[in-house]
Amino acid sequence: MSKIKREEIKKILCIKPRGIGDILLSTIVLDNLRAALPHCQIHYLTEEFAKRAVENNPFVSKILTFNKKNFVLSIIKMVRQENYDLIFDFWSNPKTAQVTFFSGAKYRVGYEKQGRKYAYNLLCKNGTMGEHAAEDNLVLLKALDIPIISRKIIYQTTIEEKQFAEKFLNEFINKDKLLIGIIPSGGWESKRCDPEKWIEICSEIQKKYKAQLIILWGPGDEKDAQLISEGFSLALLEAAASRLPIIASNIPGNDEFIEDKKNGLLFDLSKPNELAENILTLSNNRKLAFEYGSSAEESFINEYTLERYTEKLIKFFDEAYSIQNKTKTS
C-alpha cells in the first residue's frame, strides 16, 4: 500500500448514490478494505431510497443519504462535516465528482472519465478488472495497492426479514418443486424485457423445469408484474382446484372469481402494504387459510370444472337458438 500512508486513514467514504443493484455490487470492496485497513470506519453515501442495500452491512458503520433534488452544496456540506481521509467515488458522475473534490479528503479515488479527472488525485480506468460488473469496483482498490483477497458481495438481511420469508415459503410454496423468482424491474427501458417477452420466458421455464414461478416487484413495476401474472390466467383456478388459500390483486378478472374475505383475499395494487397484511393474516391463521382454500375449491367446482363449463355452454347455445327461432316466427 505504497501510495497512501496507512496510519493517516481513519475514516473512509464509499460513494454509490443509486441503482440498488449497483450499490450491492460495490460491496465487493468491503472485505478487502477491512483486511487492509482494520482500524478504519467505513461509511456510504447513497440516495435515501437506496440505503437499504447496505443498511445492515456489518462492515458499514454509517450511511449518509440525500434525495435526488437536493442541491449539491448541501451534500458537500454534509460530507465535509465528517472529515473523511479517503473517498472512493464508485459512481464518478459530474455530481459525485463535485462532492468528492470539495469533500476535504486527502485521498480521492475515482475513474478516468472525461471532464471529471480534476476531482481525483488517484485515477483508475473503468472496465479493466474482470468480466463481471462488480469487479470494476475493485479497480479503485488497485489504485491504492490494496490486495484483492476477496470477491464476496455482501448483503445482510434482518432476522425479521428471514422469518417473514421462511413463513411465506412454508405457507404458500411447495418445497418439493423448484422455485424461480422473476424480477421484471430495471432502471431504464433498455434494461427491461417487455411483459410479453417475460411471459414467453416463463412459459419456456415451466415447460423445461416444471418450476414454480414467483414474480418479485417494487414501486413502478406493478403494471408489468400484473401483465406477466395475467399471462398465466389459469393460476387462480389451478390454485383453487388444489384447495390453496388465494391472495390476488383486485383487478378485473381476479375479482370476478375471488370474493374478498369469502373465498380468498384481495388487495389494491397501489397499496403494497395490503398484500403484506394479507400474507401475514393467512400465515398466522391456518384455520382461516384452510377455510378460504376450501371455499375457493367449492367456487371452482361450482363454476369452472369441465362438466360445469359444458353445462353453461350448452345452456348458452340453447338460449341463443331459442331467441333465433322466436325472431324467425315473429
Image: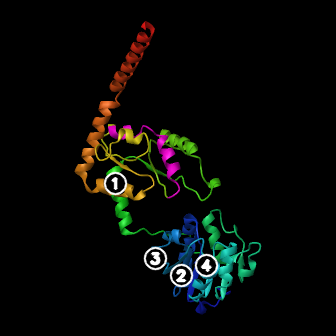
- Left or right, residue 33 beside residue 270: right
What residue sits right under mark 1 in the picture?
A: 278
Q: Which class describes the residues within 10 Å of circle 2: few (<14), some (14-19), or many (20+)?
A: many
Q: Nearer the viewer, residue 308 or 13?
A: 308
Q: Counting residues from the N terminus, which is met first, the one under dot 1 or under dot 2?
A: 2
How is this picture coloured?
Answer: rainbow
First in residue order: circle 4 vs circle 1 = 4
- Does the CB distance between marks 2 and 4 fall below 8 Å? no
Residue at label 4? Answer: 147
Give 147 or 19, whichever is nearer the viewer: 19
Nearest to the eye among marks 1 and 2: give it.
1
Q: CA distance from mark 4 to mark 1?
A: 49 Å
**Magenta residues?**
219-240
Q: Nearer the viewer, mark 2 or mark 4?
A: 2
Residue 277: x and y in percent read 34, 57
Q: Residue at x 22, y 50 (%)?
A: 287
Which residue in the protein does label 3 denote? 58
Q: Is residue 141 visible?
A: no
Viewer-nearest of discs 1 and 3: 1
Residue 236 inside the magenta-drawn segment: yes
